[in-house]
Amino acid sequence: MNGGANGATPQLSPASSNEPVVVFEDVSIGFEQKPVLENISFQVRTGEMRILLGPAGVGKSVLLKLTNGLLRPDSGRIFVFGKEISAMREQDLFEIRGHIGTVFQEGALFDSLTVRDNVGYRLLEEHIPDDEITARATEALRFVELDGTLNKFPSELSGGMRRRVAIARAIVTNPKLILYDSPTGGLDPITSTTIIELVMKQRDISHTSSIVVTHRLQDAFVLAMHRFDLASNQMEALPPHQTDPNTSFLMLHQGRLVFDGTTAELVHSNDPFIREYIS
Amino acid sequence: MAFDTIDAAARRGVLAVQDYALLSGRAVSNIFRKPFYRSDVFMQADIIGVGSLPIVILTGFFLGGVLALQSAATLTQFGAAAFTGQLVSFSMIKEIGPVVTALMVSGRNASGMASELGSMIVTEQIDAMRALGTDPLKKLVMPRIVATVVMLFFLVILSDAVGILGGGFVSVSMLGQDGSQYFHTSYQSLQFPDILQGLVKPVFFGFIIATIGCFYGMRTRGGTQGVGRSTTQAVVWSSILIIITDFMISRFLIGIFGR
């Protein structure tokens, strides 16, 4: 959120470290004896954004919930920040989750708390002084351009504003990893662009590792082919044939990972399903 | 085919009991683990305890009144109308006070807990809480259990007192009995086992109300319809368990103390 160089356009360079933040090793999970994800293996490296594509109901949100330990795999291993979360007790997971920001599909804001308390929830739990919570919540809300909503309740906000508050809640503690679960789902095109711009801003300014779940190809390609310009405070298209080196794709189909690669590899894939999906 | 259905239903039942035991056990063990959500306990105590005061006072008063009315009619046939106070206080303290208060609180709060937590489940707020590093069993379930157990204990005492007062009001104003005789017999006949029975029951009932309400809330599935289903099941099962537990505690304590 606040880790970028002031006024400078972020440089297009690969992530500084190759150290994996998230590692999936042969992970499978099913519900009521029906397999949902089978033998999923991939990595997310520091500063990298993985865009997870796939048709609705293929298990994209399940994969995100596995990443922050909200679900446990039936088999396989999941490492986050080098720790095997698939073998940890729920009580021990709370500490790890403190370093992961999650933006849920519908925002999942606490409807009985104000925007300030929603954004500063984690800080409230850590008994940070009230003034500091207000300051940090205001700063996070300014990042999503909603700094006038501090004392409003979620029910008083529009769908797009709620999604932006959810992003502010996810970034307020400067997490090392952010999980976006369909951040633009159900929103109109203009609001979707605003949200994608914020996701891009977080990627290019703070270089936070992230997994973005979406079934909207347009959003995925906007993220891959644009960068955030801090000077003009808006996104700008990359030169032709150039894509963001820190953004790559994963694609799920029928519970299996059918693609793991760069934007160019995705576009030039010969896999019939991928060709049909991106056409 | 029929055997498969019975088998599946039995398995679901056993799993539900196991989940309930795990939720209750973890929530209780959280009382002794940091952080202790003191302000949440006080907030729940206000909602459950103070919020239930009007219904507990009203039901207690009129139950005491109707007990006096009904028992006096029978006692008069045996020339024992003077024992109306004793009968009302016995019934209120040992049985009707704890059971009816628990059923009223269950109807109001087990349903409230199930619907509140159920709504949070279906809108992913519980997942969001876990993702933000907070244990919902510690933050949401534990305060409700502590608050319900403590507040029901005091609500039952209040209900007993108001019920005896209600019985006294009816005895004096409608049945023409002597007030001092009514309260004298009410008080004099009570012994330690009677009071103990009246005070042990609300502790168990409070635990049942909160754990069943939270259990059904936390296992809500299927959107708003699921929330409605959880709410109904919470009230039904907490009421059934309260009455079964009442019988067991009564039998146990009567077995020990002989009354």
Image (tube, coloured by chain):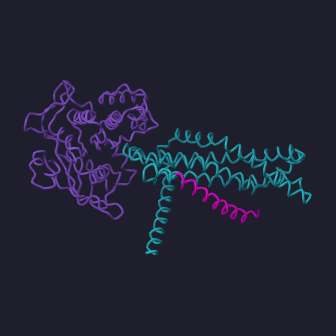
> Which residue reaches farthest left?
A241
Q: Position of residue A73 (x, y in %)?
A: 31, 58
Q: Position of residue B73 (x, y in %)?
A: 86, 55
Q: Position of residue B35 (x, y in %)?
A: 47, 43
Nearer the observer, B137 or B243: B243
Nearer the observer, A199 or B71: B71
Which corner quadrant of the image does residue A6 belong to? top left
> Which residue reaches farthest right?
B79
Which corner quadrant of the image does residue A130 belong to? top left
Q: Is residue A204 magenta?
A: no
First to last magenta residue range = B231-259
Apparent colour of chain A: purple
Residue depicted at x 66% and y 48%: B153
Tell me the quadrant of the picture where the N terminus of chain B can be found. Answer: bottom left
Tell me the quadrant of the picture where the C terminus of chain B can be found. Answer: bottom right
Residue A233 lies left or right of residue B246; in this view the side is left
Residue depicted at x 48% and y 58%: B22
Q: Position of residue A220 (x, y in %)?
A: 20, 42
Which corner quadrant of the image does residue A225 belong to? top left
Q: Main secondary structure of the magenta part?
A: helix
Residue B254 lies left or right of residue A125; in this view the side is right
Residue B68 lies left or right of residue B141; in this view the side is right
Q: How many marks?
A: 0
Nearer the observer, B94 or A114: A114
Q: Is residue B238 above or below residue A136?
A: below
Which chain did the renderer colour cyan? B
Q: Is residue A144 above or below residue B68?
A: above
Q: Is residue B242 magenta?
A: yes
